[in-house]
Image (tube, helix red, strand yellow):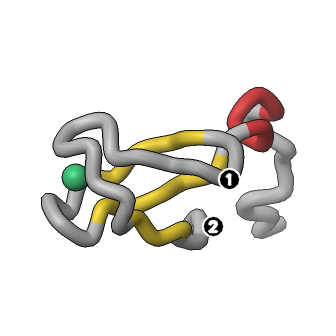
Amino acid sequence: MCSVGDSFNLDISELESDLYKCLDCSNEFKSMGKRVLCPTCHSKKVQKIEKEA
Ligand SMILES: [Zn+2]
């Protein structure tokens, strides 16, 4: 048998927030809502990034 990655280990609470990256300081953070600011430098230039599987 070789069954790998067949378990559901997803943290449901993380689905509530999205992952963003600041284009100014490259900080990655989780946030919610439409107006997202970088928590480090307070920049508005943040980009929503896909979560890696
Ligand atoms: Zn920043």
Residue 41 at x, y percent in the picture: 18, 44
Q: Which kind of residue does numbered mark 2 sit on? A: Ala
Q: What percent of the width, then of the height, locates residue 9?
A: 76, 39
Task: Kindly indicate the quadrant of the structure image that contains residue 46.
Answer: bottom left
Residue plotted at (59% across, 64% down): 51
Q: Amino acid at mark 1?
A: Lys
Q: Residue furthest top?
A: 13
Q: Which residue is mark 1?
A: 34
Q: Position of residue 42 (x, y in %)?
A: 27, 43
Above or below, comparing residue 16 to residue 25 in the picture: above
Disc with the residue nearer the chain's start (1 vs 2): 1
The mark found on residue 53 in the picture is 2
The residue lying at 14 percent from left, 59 percent from top is 25
Placement of 19 over or under 16, stated as above or below: below
Q: Using residue 37 as the reference point, say whether residue 19 is left or right of it.
A: right
> Closer to the camera, 42 or 5?
42
Which structural element holds mark 2? loop
Residue found 46% across the figure and 70% down from its top:
47
